[in-house]
Image: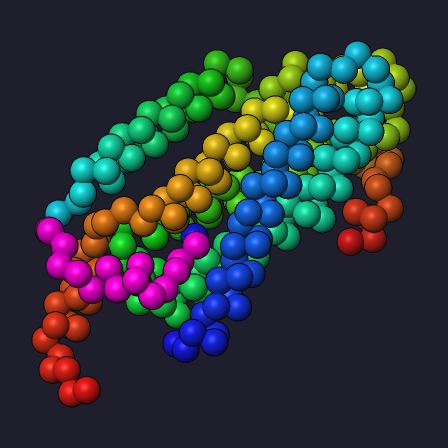
Amino acid sequence: MALGHGKDEDRSTEAETDGMPRWVKGFIVVAVGVVIVLVLAALLTGGQHSPGRHSGAGPVGNASQTLAEAGAVHPAVEAW
Amino acid sequence: MTLGVRRPVLVVHIICSVGWIGAAIAYLALGVAAQVSPQAAVVRAAWIGMELTGWFVIVPLGGLAFLTGVVLSLITRWGLLQHYWVVIALVLTTTAFAVLVWHMPDVSALAAIARAGDDAATTRLGGDVVHPALGILVLIVVAVINIYKPRGLTRRGRARQQERRSVPDLS
């Protein structure tokens, strides 16, 4: 959200037309389409979701449980 | 708010936002390496690198970019909910950061398996490509919106504009 100032900011005081701009409507349509595709993809893969799932390694399940089972956490991460 | 306050916040915001994109691209490179490499050592190193990069670079940069973005909107006349481009940038940034924080424990879990598992188990882990690729796409969209700042006032923004016009200019 790089919000500038000066000339750019002065535009905020300019008169603007009522209603939602066309670019916002187009953006919302595309965003809804992308969300639907992602939801369908998640449903088609059985609702499981993890990095390994995308690569065919299977779901990692409960992360903390898997960490405990693996018995190894990087010292830096553990300390943090 | 004075320029002396806004500019340092803007500098931090730009550094963190651009750094977030760069770190995500580096993460994607590691994710692709783990995905395509048949060597367990490469997959292991990539997952350890992804875990460290994620927790110690991407998450802090993302958090700072989000926070400084909100602060900037509040201390400038753009406002947080007055312009559609600010609202959309806020929603996308919030979503990207939330997915990142939600995703990282799984990365840690797989990194732990890579660290402790045998070569066969490590090679089967594969990589992480979809999440960083989508994240980078979202961050680039946010960057483009922030630079172009397309016009459009929200209902709240139009109300604020009317208020400002109704106040007589005494300067």
How many badges with numbers are in the image?
A: 0
Taking B56 as reference, is A51 above or below it?
Answer: above
- Residue A9: x and y in percent read 30, 62
Can you name the residue that lies furthest to the bottom here? Answer: B170
| Residue B8 in the figure: left or right of residue B143 | right
Image quarter (top left, top right, bottom left or bottom right) of the N terminus of chain B: bottom left
Image point (54%, 39%), residue name: B99
Q: How is the image coloured?
A: rainbow
Q: Position of residue A77 (x, y in %)?
A: 79, 47
> Would you say residue A45 is visible in this rendering?
yes
- Where does residue A47 sit, x and y in percent of width and height? 52, 22
Residue A52 coordinates in the image, percent (x, y): 67, 22
* Quadrant of image for the C terminus of chain B: bottom left
Residue under the image location 61 percent in, 40 percent down: B22
Residue B77 is drawn in which quadrant?
Answer: bottom left
The answer to whether residue B96 is above or below residue B38 is below
Find residue B163 and report its image quarter.
Answer: bottom left
Give the residue at x 56% y 24%.
B130
Q: Is residue A13 magenta?
A: yes
Q: Is residue B82 left or right of residue B2?
A: left
Depth order, front residue of B83/A54: B83
- Which residue corresponds to the image point at 43% horizontal and 52% vertical from the top-left? A1
**Residue B57 placement, left or right of A25:** right
Q: Is residue B105 magenta?
A: no
Q: Is residue A58 visible?
A: no
Asked if residue A11 is positioned above or below residue B107 in the image, the reply reads: below
Q: Residue furthest front?
A: A7
What is the span of residues highlighted in magenta in the rendered image? A2-18
Q: Is residue A36 above or below residue B91?
A: above
